[in-house]
Amino acid sequence: MYSLVHHGRRFVELRKCCSLRVSVQNASAFSNSFSSATATDVRIRDGRKGNNFTVSYLVDSLGLSKKLAESISRKVRSEGKANPDSVLSLFRSYGFTDSQISSIITDYPLLLTADAEKSLGPKFKFLQSRGASSSELTEIVSTVPKILAKKEGKSISRYYDLVKEIIEADKSSKFQKLSLSLPQGSKQEHKIRNISALRELGMPQKLLFSLLVSGGGFVCGKEKFEESIKKVVEMGFDPTTAKFVEALRVIQGFSDKVIEEKVNACKRLGFVVEDAWTVFKKWPSLMKNSEKKIENSIETFIGLGFTRDEFAIIVKRYPICIGLSAESVKKKTEFLVKKMNWPLKNVVSTPAVLGLSMEKRIVPRCNVIRELMSKGLLGDRGRELQLPPMQYVLNMTNQLFLERYVMKHDDKELVAELMSIFTNGQVS
């Protein structure tokens, strides 16, 4: 195992040299992204007499987005005995800031439906009785809110100790072997040992903690887990990325024989072995698709006018297209080619457009382009009217799109008209 860990660490150091940063300050950044959300007057009853729990309260007090606040309120409303105010009061009584509470509720909304007195309170008290300081308690729960889903007692204690050790290790840039007394052969023992091995490979907190609190996976025996890690490392996956986790799940879930059969199935469908592995590295979940699913995907694309060779190119560039529904692929391709008059080859060269939202991205932007075309306002001065490249129109950010195609016009009425078309985003 030492050589494997050494290999993994060297791989991580090389990636760091290329400006790859392993960081876990996402929680605060994520919560801050909601700070500009606006309030709403929607009110939701929390199931208790006379108490109003409002969406505007979540937006104004915790900085949640309106959409997330409404989603949380619906979940709270579905729990007849939920009292979210008592949950928020409990967190504040233990020293959690509004920013921390915002991060916690964003990551684990169902906490608002928990019983503060009977469920959450005893867990906080238990952890304090084991020596957890106020700062440690708030930091760890804010980083891994789902730790509160663990049962009070040894279960939550062990997970808490592991999270604490990982956080402290990252602060000191050192990592000591985890020494928790766990029942030999138990699921907890397997999971914590295996996650500790991933930590030694350089996997960041964000990924480790999501695995730690997940319901299943990574609970196999030591030898099988080490063999799976070895295969994934040798394939060239970066231990600091989510793709490493995806690949590890796939490799663990299938035997060598099954994986070989799936590669052979890709060969029968027109892929060379190298292409199959190239796609797997881009999208590890490829192996989860059946031969029938891949075959149906080929038929869908060929039915739209693509050749088999073009399909192979599309899959290599955007493997996730295999997982898209036939209806989605048809709807987007026909709109782009028949309504917008972009050549089919444009989809081949930029297949990621098939993964974009029809309602939020494709239709609003294309309606603006069509309106500009109808008014003769596209193209350089003195040149023939020309439809801009598909990838150029659809891949840029909303802000850049609006600057390039809407806000640049001097005619205020035209700008207002284009903004209305863009905002409404209706298929015409």
Image (tube, helix red, strand yellow):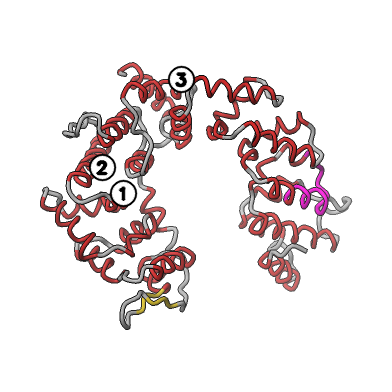
Between discs 1 and 3, the one toward the N terminus: 1
x and y percent of residue 332 in the render?
A: 72, 50
| Crowding near the residue tagged with mark 1, few <14, some 14–19, many ≥20 C-alpha atoms within 10 Å | many
Residue extending farthest bottom? 50
Residue name at image x 52 percent, y 19 percent = 257
Vertical side of 401 occupied by 117: above or below: below
Q: Quadrant of the C terminus?
A: bottom right
In three-dimensional space, the C-alpha distance between marks 1 and 3, rounded to whole angstroms, equals 31 Å
Residue indicated by mark 3? 234
* Mark positioned earlier in the residue sequence (2 or 1): 1
Look at the numbered disc 3 and give the secondary structure of its residue. Answer: helix
The answer to whether residue 218 is left or right of residue 370 is left
User: Is residue 404 on the magenta stretch?
Assistant: no
* Nearer the observer, 163 or 258: 258
Residue range in magenta is: 332-345
Q: Which residue type does callout 2 highlight?
A: Val
Callout 3: 10 Å neighbours few (<14), some, many (20+)? few
Q: Is residue 204 left or right of residue 302?
A: left
What is the distance, in whole Å, between disc 2 and disc 1 at their CAs? 8 Å
Q: Do the numbered discs 2 and 1 sit on residues whose CB atoms are within 8 Å?
A: yes
| Contact flag, marks 3 and 2 (Cβ < 8 Å) | no
Image marks 1 and 3: residues in contact by CB distance under 8 Å: no
**Residue placed under numbered mark 1 in the picture:** 144
Disc 2 marks which residue?
Answer: 163
- Residue drawn at (81%, 56%), measured in percent from left and top? 378
Amino acid beneath label 3: Glu
Residue 335 lies in magenta, yes or no? yes
The picture places residue 425, in percent across and down from the top left corner, at: 69, 64
Which image quadrant for residue 185?
top left
